[in-house]
Amino acid sequence: MKYITTIGKGTLFRIQIVTLLCLMCLAGGLHSQTAMVNVLNRHKTSLNGDWQVIIDPTGIGEWKQVWQEKKPQKKTDFVEYSFDGGPYLKVPGDFNSQLCELTYFEGTIWYKKRFQNALQVGKRLFLYFGAVNYMADVYLNGEKIGSHEGGFTPFQFEITDKVKPGNNTIVVKVNNSRQANGLPGTGYDWFNYGGITRDVDLIETGNSYIEDYFIQLQKGSLNQVLGWVQLNGAQAPQNIRVKIPELNLLYKTRTDKKGRAKVEFSSRIKLWSPESPKLYKVIVESESDTLADSIGFRSIEVKGNKVLLNGNPIFLKAVNIHEENPYKKARAYSIEDARILLKAAKELGCNFVRLAHYPHSENTIREAEKMGLMVWSELPVYQHIQFSDSVVPKKMDRMLNEIVRRDKNRCGVIVWSLSNETYPGTPNRNEVLINLTAKCHALDSTRLITHVINTHNYKDNTFNVWEPLYKYSDLIAINEYIGWYDPWQGNPSETRWQIAFPDKPVFISEFGGEALYGNNSAPTDEASNWTEGYQEKIYANQTEMFNTIPNLCGVCPWILFDYRSLGRMNQVYQNGYNRKGLLSEKGEKKKAWYIMNEFYKKK
Ligand code: GCB
């Protein structure tokens, strides 16, 4: 705010007017559209690469209207901004890891990219962003086309009527400042990588195109597909064909007046599983569009106190993963990044990954599916969320919609996790999360839905798990850090459990403790030494305790790799890293890794 006090009343008035106009624009609904699905396989031109940027720590670019790219008109004119002469940043990619002056930056960066347009009559053009963290205001040729909030989900704008033949310019104002009423809020234990962190594409379609489809097994069935296809822009009902060449399957259906067609067929499908992650080429055709995808089919359900994959009980051997490439100290986004993280999970012995605490990139989800890893996908409804701010539930709905839309055809995704460690006393919390659960069921009733809770009581070697929100959760997902944040209250193998919902499967979604790799010389019986031995003991005790948990369906250590988190300020041992990794940020295996690996081998 400093610049406001130094630039005089007239300027202050102009800033207020601009702010008011901006608010009016937002109220007028200049929002992005929810993105079409399966962007990977569409007719598109990538806008990835070098983008020019202006670093704007005070936010003054808003007042200067940077997006207008003004140039001096006469000899006495000058313009106090310019993309020319400034740095370039790579898109996709976070900005913090690209320039050292941006390492800890949380604020505004203006991005600019030119593109050539040669759109033919009868075609439509969309500008697609895989993700921008956190706020994006998007301008095309000096005109605002809309905004998007939320750092981990895709969005798009139709620009058919806005592009010019030839040269066009996109300017994006990216702001990664923490928002009190944001998702997540202001406090979280991971690095706030800002920027245009995922792909940007221009997608070309015909007048009517296949916008979305849902092609998965009906809940509980092993051979019956139940879903739909949704067209956009269809003037009249159209014939739709769904083909799976490998199954010799050709299914014909027809859209209704709203462009929607029901899909319902059965076939002798080879089911997807971690042991055999079979994906089929599925082709969806309308009268004017064709789209291919790789789709797997599996059934996931909770029956009594068990999780069943394809009708058989399964133990979920999981690990928590943040979307960070440890070697690059950067936000992970590419297929190569995904493989680094997922291969490490496979090597540990996992069949399941909890992608914490926000939706990871589509590359990760698709790679996991190919590698036979089941996926837990989570919304950043994390700890201190302002449930009583009326805009917050709307943001949740929107984000849920965006992520379910993007990933609902990925059979690897078996869990939608709607919240992590929110607190029972927070006003409106239960009401909002119960509503969100109902909305998730309405969007997709085929997967498990869960809330992760850490507010149990642990006393006299007894866990009392009482949270009423578990009523709305398919899994009793528990984060517990016994041996680290809470000392053991007795012999781990004699732990007792009182669980308010005794008929549901229990999943330990987090446990662990910190250790600095290679720190082996200090006494291992004191937490404050951050030794591998102390962490190893936590894991040995935890794996013993797991035998005492009724209905245990899986466990998930926190976390695979040490990862950056600025709240971790012990400069001897942490140095800006959460050190609960089973692997160091260089990929070195800590002693606890071997305990977990053995445990998974025996499961
Ligand atoms: C938790 C949180 C996770 C933290 C972790 C920790 O309970 O869910 O986001 O990073 O503990 O290391 O404290």
Image (cartoon, rainbow, N blue to C red):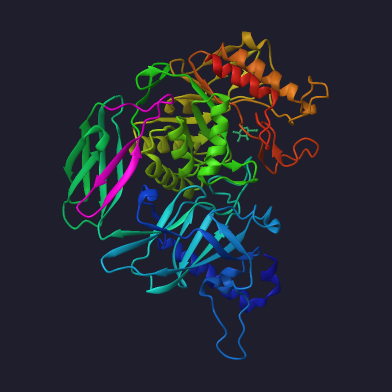
Q: Position of residue 335 (x, y in %)?
A: 50, 44
Residue 71 highlighted magenta (yes or no): no
Ligand 1 sits in which quadrant?
A: top right
Q: Count how many numbered circles sit on residues in the image.
A: 0
Residue at (54% x, 63% y) in the render: 173
Image quadrant containing the N terminus = bottom right
Relative to the observer, which residue lies in front, 603 or 509?
Answer: 603
Displayed quadrant of residue 59:
bottom right
Q: Where is residue 134 in the image (x, y as percent from the top left)?
A: 54, 53
* Residue farthest to the top, as pictured: 494
For residue 90, above or below residue 81: above
Answer whether residue 487 is visible to the viewer in this image: no
* Residue farthest to the bottom, as pictured: 75
Segment tinted magenta in the rendering: 269-295
Relative to the observer, which residue lies in front, 309 or 348?
Answer: 348
Q: Where is residue 591 in the image (x, y as percent from the top left)?
A: 70, 23
- Would residue 210 appear left or right of 131 to someone viewing this image? left
For residue 20, above or below residue 594: below
Answer whether residue 550 is visible to the viewer in this image: yes
Residue 283 highlighted magenta (yes or no): yes
Residue at (40% x, 41% y) in the render: 407
- Would residue 111 appear left or right of 229 to someone viewing this image? right
Q: Where is residue 115 in the image (x, y as percent from the top left)?
A: 45, 68
For residue 451, above or below residue 7: above
